[in-house]
């Protein structure tokens, strides 16, 4: 893997890791900021997502290879799809699910770009 591609993967991992750490440490604040007043997701759910993001980012930063990028892309795409489904069926959680789907979708696209070397 080229040095430039590894640097891109590490940059994506740093951003994703920072977001994951925020979700892990401040779940209530993130949940309230991303939700309507009567649709705040439970803190433990936000923490689990944050932990998954942080572990994924740490692995990709430590070893920025294609296999780990592929695994991260799969995890992000799966999360995005599940949040789109939740947004479609739950009026109450539509806003936080849509935001989570968007973030995971962006992460998926950036992971694919890092994997292939395209911008």
Image (cartoon, grey):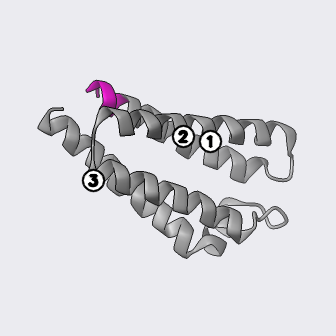
The C terminus - image quarter = top left
Q: Which stretch did the figure color magenta?
A: 113-119
The residue pinned by badge 1 equals 79
In this view, the residue farthest toward the left is 3
Determine which of the numbered discs, if any, sits on residue 35 in the image. Answer: none
Q: Is residue 6 above or below residue 56?
A: above
Mark 1 Cα within 10 Å, few/some/many (few <14, many 20+)? many
Task: Decide whether residue 115 is among the magenta residues.
Answer: yes
Q: Earlier in the sequence, mark 3 or mark 2?
A: 3
Q: Is residue 94 above or below residue 108?
A: below
Q: Is 56 left, or right, of 4 in this rendering? A: right
Q: Is residue 70 above or below residue 37?
A: above
| Residues at discs 2 and 1 in contact (Cβ within 8 Å) | yes
The image shows residue 115 at horizontal and vertical percentages of: 32, 30
Q: Quadrant of residue 113?
A: top left
Q: Secondary structure at mark 1?
A: helix
The residue pinned by badge 3 equals 62
Mark 2 Cα within 10 Å, few/some/many (few <14, many 20+)? some
Q: Secondary structure at mark 3?
A: helix
From the image, state whether disc 3 or disc 1 is nearer to you. Answer: 3
The residue pinned by badge 2 equals 75
Q: Residue at x 21, y 41 (%)?
A: 6
The image shows residue 78 at horizontal and vertical percentages of: 61, 36
Q: Residue at x 69, y 70 (%)?
A: 43
Q: Is 79 left, or right, of 17 in this rendering? A: right
Task: Decide whether residue 83 is among the magenta residues.
Answer: no
Q: Residue at x 77, y 41 (%)?
A: 87
């Amino acid at each position: 893997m080229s040095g430039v591609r590894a640097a891109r993967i590490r940059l994506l991992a740093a951003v994703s890791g920072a977001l994951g750490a925020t979700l892990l440490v401040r779940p209530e604040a993130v949940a309230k900021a991303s939700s309507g007043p009567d649709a705040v997701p439970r803190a433990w759910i936000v923490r689990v997502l944050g932990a998954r993001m942080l572990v994924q980012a740490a692995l990709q930063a430590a070893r920025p290879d294609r296999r780990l990028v592929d695994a991260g892309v799969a995890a992000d795409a799966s999360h995005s799809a599940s949040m789109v489904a939740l947004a479609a069926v739950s009026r109450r959680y539509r806003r936080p699910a849509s935001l989570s789907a968007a973030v995971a979708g962006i992460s998926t696209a950036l992971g694919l770009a890092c994997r292939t070397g395209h911008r």
